[in-house]
Image (tube, coloured by chain):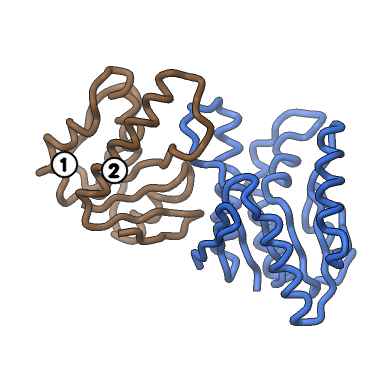
Chain colours: A blue, B brown
Amino acid sequence: MNYFISGGCKNGKSFHAQRVAKKMSEENGLPLYYIATMIPIDEEDNIRIDRHISERAGWGFETIEQPVNILGCLDKIDNKGVFLFDSVTALLMNEMFPVSGEPNLGAAKKIAKELEEFCSRTDNTVFVSDYIYSDCNKFDDLTDKYREGLALLDKTLAKACGQVVEVAYGFTKVHK
Amino acid sequence: MILIFGGAFQGKLEYVMEKYKLEDNQVFTCKGDKIEIDYSKKIIDNLEEFVYVCTKEGVEAKEILLENMGKLKDKIIICDDISQGVVSLDKTERAWREMVGRTMLMLGKESEEVIRIFCGLPDKIK
């Protein structure tokens, strides 16, 4: 069953997701893959990635780099494995705002279709996203387009996944 | 009165339209430039924008709504939850966040039903 996790930043979502994925893999005797979506652009990013790698050490994940075109990784690995997909937020960032080039405003619609396919082809994926919708700022158009796009992906996944969980400071609220 | 809230773009209006089988012409969408609500419509959407104009004009939104409570009894009110981000550097936005909080506390108390929408999924709170 696919599993969708969201909530505020630095609330323990990734840790919860790791535990869910690990359990799914152990119970069904399936290989465990970590889909790495982040494209590091500076030293700060490298430090964050190193911290995430050390946090996953010993959990048994094989890391697959797939920062864009998410279905690409399914051609390379066993689709019946367990996937930890962290995060939907970074994937949209990578495709909507390519490092070189203009913003791609059609990115969210494209990714929504790909995520639906990812769900049906794997059926053992834990998705992590970020709940960034309750600020009191009047954002610029591009930021709002990004929030709207991420919300589309979240709603698509909440519909497609069998379980939907919100994490708040390590506590979980089951929505589905 | 039914109160629906949740973060931006969470599918609040879509949820209401589908659940209560309503048409677009039954929705009043609050705009950020005029203190105005059309009480003849079934749904009052984007209430946070109504509160935003009230904030700019220095009027307490809660008071206007309380004065018109009789007309709000059979309505569905939809409002963005703007309470959980970073405190804004902008004075109006800070005051807006506080006024939305006061308005929502009052509406939550007055409503028979309160539903929070999370990523398109309803969570009945009251």
Residue count near mark 1 (Cα–Cα under 10 Å), binned few <14, some 14–19, many ≥20: few
Kindly identify the amino acid type of the residue bearing the numbered disc 1.
Ser
Lower sequence index among marks 1 and 2: 1
Kindly identify the amino acid type of the residue bearing the numbered disc 2.
Leu
At a point 71% along the width and 51% down the height, the residue shown is: A87
Q: Quadrant of the N terminus of chain A?
A: bottom right
Residue A95 position by quadrant = top right
**SS at circle 2:** helix
Task: Tell me the CA gap for discs 1 and 2.
Answer: 24 Å
Residue A165 position by quadrant = bottom right
**In this orientation, which residue lies closer to the viewer: B12 or B103?**
B103
At a point 75% along the width and 40% down the height, the residue shown is: A94
Dot label at residue A96: none
Give the residue pinned by disc 2. Answer: B105
Q: In the rendered image of this protein, does residue B26 appear above or below residue A31? A: above
- Image location (x, y in percent) of residue A66: 83, 52
- Image location (x, y in percent) of residue A30: 81, 77
Give the residue pinned by disc 1. Answer: B40
Residue A55 position by quadrant = bottom right
At a point 40% along the width and 41% down the height, the residue shown is: B80
